[in-house]
Amino acid sequence: MKLFTKLALVSAVAISGQAMAMESMDDSALSSATGQDGISLGIALDHLTIENLYIHDNDGLSDAKETNFGYVAAGTNPVTPEVLGTSLGGTKKAGAITITGNGIAGDRNETNAIDIQANAAGGLAKFGTTNVLAKLDIDSDAGTGTSGAFLNIGAKVSGLDIAIGKIGVAKSNTAQASGAQRGIVAGSNNTIISGLTLKTGLTTANIQLGATPQGAMILLNGKMQGGLEISDLGIVDNAGGGTIQLGKISIADHGGSDLTTNAKVSVVPGALKIEAMSNATDMYIKSIKLGESSTLPAGYVKSIGDVEISNMNVSHSGIAGAVILVSGH
């Protein structure tokens, strides 16, 4: 969920950057021109589609295995993991994580990898009386000390219905010297997730650039109305031909219907740092089917039941929440 919320926020910030670049105006000049301080932007979009999304790993996977002390050559007995034998199967050739359409006639993702629509039931951001995808309130402040100045962007993002097509892995085409397309090798795409749908509620966030008195570049501090729903998630075993199908996953605060979205996102030396999950949560996974397949008659595979997880808490170094670090290798 956070990934797509952040994509929406980044898109909105990018658009706002173009608008602000038209004329250099500080808060004082703006106040003289308009009678008010700061800038408010409403991003009026109710539908966004992406045909294909590829994330290229340019050097692929080395045919060596990670040990407790680094990497060793293929064929050498590793410290861990023994189960892999003598080779990981890597070729050091570029591959890609892919999101593509599912090819199902009439489906939202028939030809589009990602289909995003505003979800009125989840709450809509308002710009005055107008429904918008996102509202941004932008202010610059001197801060404290010589180097304390910062840009503050308060954001509200409407509830969203996000339909995602097939997720797979494929061989990357050779990178081009010009243009903005690379693509994948035809016929090489192996599906690993058959698709899923996300339903989010109205979400608030605060972004600070320059000095960050709030303690992080991006601060999520609010509630997602109605919680988070993930539906129609299928995890594919390409070799075996079957799928683990999950009907719906519902996530909310423990004992409630909304989901608290407290999180901090920072860029630290060497990585993106995400601090999140500080609140107790409940999770309900509905209709778990093992071995679902398009080759079997409809209704052939029966659900093994539902799974309920209540009052889940995580902590790190004695502090509530988890720390996630994201970096390249």
Image: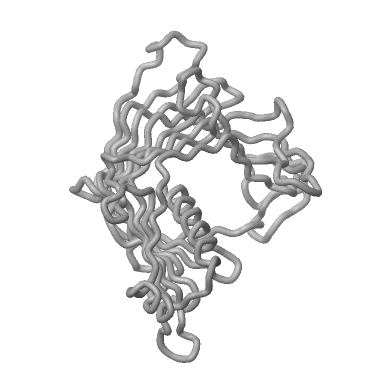
The colour scheme used to paint the residues is: one colour
Query: As displayed, is residue 228 above or below residue 150?
Result: above
Q: Residue at x 38, y 79 (%)?
A: 32
Q: Is residue 309 left or right of residue 110?
A: left
Q: Is residue 254 left or right of residue 81?
A: left
Q: Residue 242 placed where, x, y %?
A: 51, 21
Q: Is residue 132 left or right of residue 93?
A: left
Observer-nearest of 288 and 194:
194
Q: Residue 303 placed where, x, y %?
A: 34, 21
The single residue placed furthest to the right in the displayed view is 177
The single residue placed furthest to the top in the displayed view is 297
Observer-nearest of 99 and 322:
99
Q: Residue at x 41, y 52 (%)?
A: 43
Query: As displayed, is residue 147 above or below residue 46?
Result: below
Q: Residue at x 44, y 34 (%)?
A: 163
Q: Residue 44 placed where, x, y %?
A: 40, 48
Q: Residue 135 placed where, x, y %?
A: 36, 57
Q: Is residue 63 left or right of residue 24?
A: right
The single residue placed furthest to the left in the displayed view is 255
Number of numbered discs present? 0
The answer, for residue 299, to whether it is visible in the render is yes
Observer-nearest of 309 and 273:
273
The single residue placed furthest to the front in the displayed view is 33
Image quarter of residue 204 = bottom left
Q: Quadrant of the C terminus?
A: bottom right
The answer, for residue 86, to whether it is visible in the render is no
Image quarter of residue 50 = top right
Query: As displayed, is residue 317 above or below residue 102?
Result: below
Observer-nearest of 217 and 62:
217
Q: Residue at x 65, y 30 (%)?
A: 189
